[in-house]
Amino acid sequence: MCGISGIINLNRSRVDEDQIRAMMREMKHRGPNDDGTFMEDNIGFGFVRLSIIDLSTDGHQPMFSHDGRYVMIFNGEIFNYVELREELKIRGYTFRTKTDTEVLLTAYIEWGEDMLHLLNGMWAFVIYDRVEKVLFGARDRYGKKPFYYIIEDERFMFASEIPSLLAVMGKKPTPDNDALFDFLVFNRTDQNEGTFFKEIKKLNHGHSIKMRVAPDRIRKKEPFITKKWYNLKYELRRPYKNPEEFREAFQESINIRLRSDVPIGVCLSGGLDSSSIVSTLVQDFKKDDVHTFSAVYGDGKYGDESKFIDLYRPQLKNMHFVQPDEHTLMADIDSIVRAHAEPIAGTGPYAQYKVMELARQNVTVTLDGQGADEMLAGYHYFFGFHFKNLLRKGRVGKLASEMTHYYLKHSAFMGILSYILFMLPAGLRARARAMEYGYIDSDFYNAHASENTSIASELYGSLSLQDALINHFEYKLEHLLKWEDRNSMWFSIEARVPFLDHRLVESTLSLDDDLIINEGMTKHILREAMKGRLPEKIRMRRDKIGFGTPHDEWFRTPIFQKYINDIINSPAFASRGLVDAKKVQDLYAKHLDRKGNHGKEIWKWIHMERWFNTFID
């Protein structure tokens, strides 16, 4: 796991190595163990390494092919590198190292771009053909590893993190109001190639990039072409016949992600997903010495899942805990802003940030439950898509039954309200979300609502549960993976996500709805697969917390009252033209008077303003 960066000068000039070094310094946390550069003609690469597989110097990058023709920098892990290496040996190749990096480079030499479909892992890489003067790069299927870039008149630059690009951009960045609109209205980011900076784009997940870098063959206006090499909708596999097949596939996904030459731990929240990973490790792989890392807040406080986590105390020897509170959050705010470089829509990622900070004291790799909610309809609003699909199919009796089960088991209306929202026309869906709290500036809303339709039309407009799940992989999942990447790599930790093995995803998303949502419960096939393996109180949990925090109470404490009031009453905050400052102030006053819990919105105001202060102002 590493950080990559590069500059290609479109004006034929040589790249300044000092600029490459500046990019590398900005993300040294991604690779504290080693670094390297490649400088040739009008191209320059930079690399920082976090050693995970083959800790020797053999893993140094940039890595060259045996004949020196190809040079590569690579961020990620190829989990099936052992199998690929054996296949390549049969085809006559020899290997100098034990790294997955050399396997990846050799696979490209043998199969070209088609090798992407053979990879099981997470990656962002570029390979440069020094003979043909062609650069090829790609991201993994679901966007686990980042790839940002800037196109200027005279150069193309790319990096694993935004601050590396800002370090060499040479001018003040500009906020992207479309991204800010989606953030404020929908709590969403990363559903397209845009970022919060107008000048910076990202290569979308499942996409590749190709460009000719010979000075006489570069097209300055369109120096490269991008291609969608992976489309989940067309990659679905045979569905699992039963929960046992699902369990075996899940077990294999974990097994292949245990390949490492450094210690591995688990981020244990107490929920169904992370607990399934822990129970599989303990029961199938006999790893009762695995280290687990959890955030807790105190009995009775929102987000505290101690009563579920503690069910593992008889089984585990190495359980570690951190207790974030208003004081740690206040101390960490500026660090969080720098680590993510873009606003985040909630304090859940902060809990994960503290868990990763804790984990780095014991391990270098973690296994996390990310992706299960998108694959198995873990959020309550997925019931809305389920209900919508039943109505569309004319299954009125089944619809009534599922709505009844939902209400009786959850005593909640969110799934039903989501169903109503999803039945509205796209324009009304967007307005309903924007008007939910009423503080979005009306001029800002009117200027951007018609341009930002992918969430309201594609994500919320899904016709079936399966379409909704696929669209979540397309438009929503990536921002969660981005937050996990930033949190883990800030502390030089590699986070692996067993639920997002593409084989597991592609078969699960082919399942009938009844195996995903059944009688008012989500993740049906996972719950059945883990019967007798998980503590029953966890297996049949009805609540959904995730990385929840008691931020509503944090933002009522004196330390935050002053901090928040200073922000929302400042001239700078009001001048952004994004929110109605008076309505924001009124909403916070209601929060303090306990006339509502608005912690998530409050956090958005805080983080957005600190982001402006740090990167824009």
Image (cartoon, grey):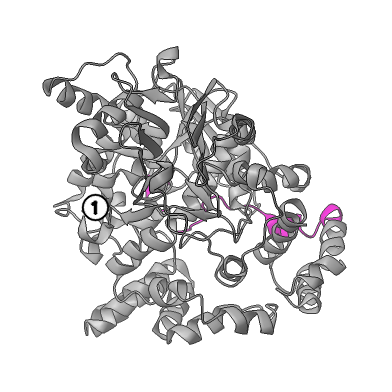
Q: What is the magenta range?
A: 536-560
Mark 1: secondary structure: helix
Residue in front for this viewpoint, 202 or 373: 202
Q: Is residue 133 left or right of residue 305?
A: left
Above or below, 448 against 160 in this view is below
Tell me where residue 303 appears, x and y as whole percent.
60, 52
* Residue 324: in magenta span: no
Label 1 Cα crowd, 10 Å radius (few <14 / some 14-19 / many 20+): many
Q: Residue at x 38, y 70 (%)?
A: 383
Tell me where residue 282 appears, x and y as whole percent.
36, 28
Above or below, 513 against 390 in this view is above
Work out which quarter of the rendered image holds the C terminus and state it.
bottom right
Tell me where residue 345 appears, x and y as whole percent.
60, 59
Residue in front for this viewpoint, 121 or 603: 121
Residue picked out by circle 1: 506
The disc labelled 1 sits on which kind of residue?
Answer: Glu
